[in-house]
Image: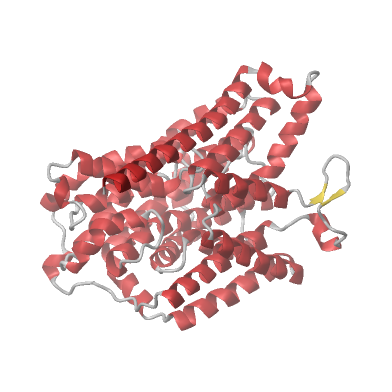
């Protein structure tokens, strides 16, 4: 298999190994810091990767994403503040364990389960991605556009509480992406006579604004409304920090099941780790011998969501690498890195840069072991570092870093303006529960979707009927429509249950 020569080439490169180790530490700290996310860190570090070789750039950001998913469990367990959305499921049992003086046990269970889930996801990625790419090579422009359509609809409708707001977020991302020069006619679109907009909206300032400034604005507003001092529940009791095999043995089936659930959900664009974590937690509780104890401090309640959370990481790369469709916000940023380095993502990637792809997989596998070792032996030290950083210092530092990163991308003050506007837009989207992930992913996908749509129209003699006449394209169109229908049905069913409960009360 191609993965073994790739692993050998990565292991024998000490500089690349150092980058993986650094990324594991950075991701863990960022994920464990309340108010920061792995997406925000990757967006801020994106300009640095312009001057790196492609593999270094991709591996560095990819491992930060992996480690950041795990790092969120540290904040959830110790601070009762989930570092990521998926860590909210870990918080249910992790924080009660910390309150009971078992923070060390909980974090070790989270570390081991994250490594198991992540490793399972990566193995499935390595085995399956070649088959997916081979199938993708047989798809023409009509089929690829239908896949884009299904991705837009699924991402917009599945995530969040409102289908309309999700679809509106996806549509807004498409509109913003269309600003600039029409690739066919050469005419300006939505530039309003501004020369700076003729080249379109830059990916880097947009992402920094939405992910970094938008998140910081939201956190600042939340802290102003509900000021609270972050305190650690770390225990100094040696028994509370040690984990035996007998204690972890009941957690293993939940971790393995969570790995399968997370890997399956990771392949589907837009669902993400939060959904995987809560599904795994619910399934684990349903199968447990003592479900009434879940939520009160069960180690199994930490293992199930953490394994699913991290198992999403690898398989979510499959649609990105084979179809050019990112399955997550981190995937959208990585797609930007590919494009910045002139690498065309899609089925042909496995013909032109197959070695690079498998080396990236190898870096991901080594990154799992890196954050696993660091987390198992040093998670409590990471929490002490975080507690020493006051928010009065943290947020100004983030602001300064964001402005420098946005300006350094192209040396343009206009990009700083774009970042600031995107920051306020990201904050408003979070405030009014619009779908930030759908907005960003749709922005990244829009140009590819437009290109394949126009190619399909040039191929067709019957206009849009080409999407109906070709079975695979029609299947994906139906899939997108079915996703909306099922989502609307689920929301209506949930509302009827709430109304019924209120009527009974």
Residue at the (54%, 80%) spot, across then down: 396
In percent of width and height, residue 208 lies at 60, 64
In percent of width and height, residue 92 lies at 27, 57
| Residue 152 in which image quadrant | top right
Residue 117 visible in the picture: no
436 above or below 379? Answer: above
Describe residue 324's horizontal placement relative to residue 297 as left or right: right
Depth check, front residue: 117 or 349: 117
404 above or below 373? Answer: below
Label count reads 0
Residue at the (52%, 29%) spot, across then down: 482
50 above or below 55? Answer: below
Depth check, front residue: 12 or 310: 310
Residue at the (73%, 38%) spot, across then down: 450
Describe residue 376's horizontal placement relative to residue 198 as left or right: left
In percent of width and height, residue 179 lies at 77, 52
| Residue 288 in which image quadrant | top left
Quadrant of the snapshot with the N terminus: top left
Residue 439 visible in the picture: yes
54 above or below 217? Answer: above
In percent of width and height, residue 40 lies at 53, 63
Residue at the (34%, 79%) spot, across then down: 229
């Amino acid at each position: 298999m191609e993965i073994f020569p790739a692993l050998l080439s990565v292991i024998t490169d000490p500089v690349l190994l150092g980058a993986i180790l650094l990324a594991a530490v950075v991701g863990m700290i960022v994920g464990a810091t309340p108010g920061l996310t792995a997406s925000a860190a990757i967006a801020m570090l994106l300009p640095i990767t312009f001057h790196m070789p492609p593999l270094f750039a991709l591996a560095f950001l990819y491992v930060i994403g992996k480690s950041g998913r795990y790092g969120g469990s540290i904040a959830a367990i110790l601070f009762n503040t989930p570092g990521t959305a998926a860590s909210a499921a870990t918080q249910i049992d992790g924080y009660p364990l910390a309150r009971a003086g078992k923070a060390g046990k909980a974090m070790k269970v989270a570390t081991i389960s994250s490594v198991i889930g992540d490793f399972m996801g990566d193995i499935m990625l390595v085995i399956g991605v070649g088959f997916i790419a081979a199938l993708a090579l047989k798809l023409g422009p009509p089929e690829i556009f239908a896949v884009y359509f299904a991705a837009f609809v699924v991402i917009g409708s599945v995530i969040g509480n409102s289908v309309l707001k999700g679809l509106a977020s996806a549509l807004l991302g498409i509109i913003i992406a269309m600003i600039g020069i029409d690739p066919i006619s050469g005419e300006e679109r939505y530039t309003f006579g501004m020369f700076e907009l003729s080249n379109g909206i830059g990916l880097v300032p947009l992402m920094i604004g939405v992910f970094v400034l938008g998140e910081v604005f939201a956190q600042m507003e939340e802290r102003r409304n509900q000021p609270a001092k972050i305190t650690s529940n770390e225990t100094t009791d040696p028994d509370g920090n040690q984990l035996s095999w007998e204690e972890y043995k009941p957690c293993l089936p939940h971790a393995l099941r969570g790995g399968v659930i997370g890997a399956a959900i990771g392949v589907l664009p837009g669902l993400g780790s939060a959904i995987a974590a809560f599904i795994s937690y619910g399934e684990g509780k349903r199968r447990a011998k003592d479900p009434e104890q879940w939520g009160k401090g069960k180690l199994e309640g930490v293992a199930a969501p953490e394994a699913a959370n991290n198992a999403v990481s690898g398989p979510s790369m499959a649609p990105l690498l084979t179809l050019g469709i990112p399955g997550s916000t981190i995937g959208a940023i990585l797609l930007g890195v590919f494009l910045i380095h002139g690498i065309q993502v899609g089925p042909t990637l496995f013909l032109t840069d197959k070695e690079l792809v498998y080396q990236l997989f190898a870096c991901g596998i080594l990154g799992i072991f890196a954050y696993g070792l660091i987390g198992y032996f040093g998670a409590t030290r990471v929490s002490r570092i975080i507690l020493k950083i006051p928010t009065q210092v943290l947020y100004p530092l983030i602001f300064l870093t964001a402005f420098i990163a946005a300006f350094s991308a192209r040396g343009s003050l206009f990009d700083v303006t774009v970042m600031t506007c995107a920051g306020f837009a990201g904050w408003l989207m979070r405030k009014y529960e619009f779908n930030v992930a759908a907005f960003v992913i749709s922005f990244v996908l829009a140009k590819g979707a437009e290109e394949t749509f126009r190619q399909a129209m040039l191929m067709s003699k019957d206009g849009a009927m080409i999407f109906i006449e070709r079975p695979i394209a029609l299947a994906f169109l139906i899939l997108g429509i079915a996703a909306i229908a099922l989502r609307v049905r689920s929301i209506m069913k949930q509302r009827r249950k709430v109304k019924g409960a209120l009527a009974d009360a």
